[in-house]
Amino acid sequence: MLCLKVPKQEGEKVRNKLLERNLLSKEAKIASEGSYLLIPVKEDPGSEFDYPLLDRDLEIRERKETDYTKLIGEKRILDEEDILELGEFASSMFEDALSTYDSQDAESAKELVDRDDKMDKMCENSTNKILGHLIEKESETLSTDQATRLGQQVSTELLTIRDLERVADHAANIAARTIYLVTSTREMI
């Protein structure tokens, strides 16, 4: 598997950039090698990332059937990777918001506020995927039990998307307050 060899202290920053550019591979786990991290990538990220690109055997992520998927007896509408990508993006925004607040870095805070638009778009795309699935299912004749399970599945996935989007909104709010602390302007509050 292709991976970047990155100093540990730069690992989170690089992981977030790869995630933003949809280059982070979720097929394998990030590995540690001495004072470096081996971060799996989908393809060669090019010259933007000035780290050695290696081909290594990394531990493959196991795909586990969750209790939820056993309960409904169907595959999720959204792939687990879709939800994980939203969660990782929201988590990186929150971590970066705390970091910009701590360092009072208004420029990074402005960039973080802009990332919230990307998160909103990602959530909108995921929601549209679920709604498209519902429209597709509408033409099928479902039993009461199947319709109930589908409703539960849709509800759970939509609420998860909403909650992750709210985490990103809170991160953007922290960034806006950082900008206010540094510049005394209320443009984003």
Image (cartoon, rainbow, N blue to C red):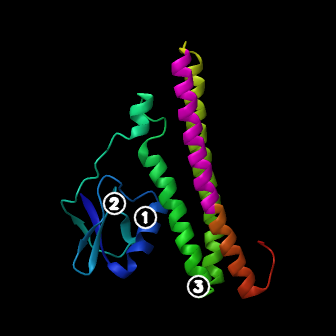
Please report the residue visible at 59 percent of the width from the left and 80 percent of the height from the top: 100
Question: How far apart in space, not on screen, are marks 2 and 3 (Cα)?
Answer: 30 Å
Please report the residue visible at 39 percent of the width from the left and 59 percent of the height from the top: 24
Q: Position of residue 151 (x, y in %)?
A: 58, 29
Give the residue at mark 1: 18
Q: Quadrant of residue 175?
A: bottom right
Where are the magenta residues, as a range? 144-168
Q: Position of residue 12 (x, y in %)?
A: 42, 73
- Which of the marked residues, 1 or 2, is nearer the chain's N terminus? 1
Amino acid type at mark 3: Asp
Q: Is 13 placed left or right of 90 in the picture?
A: left
Can you tell which mark lies on residue 95? none
Can you tell which mark lies on residue 41? 2
In the foreground, 136 or 76? 76
Q: Is 59 placed left or right of 162 in the picture?
A: left
Please report the residue visible at 59 percent of the width from the left and 85 percent of the height from the top: 102
Considering only vertical position in the picture, is 72 above or below 139? below
On-image quarter of the N terminus: bottom left
- Mark 1: secondary structure: helix
Q: Is 48 placed left or right of 153 in the picture?
A: left
Can you tell which mark lies on residue 102? 3
Q: Position of residue 37 (x, y in %)?
A: 29, 73
Q: Which marked residue is nearer to the observer: mark 1 or mark 3?
A: 3
Amino acid type at mark 2: Val
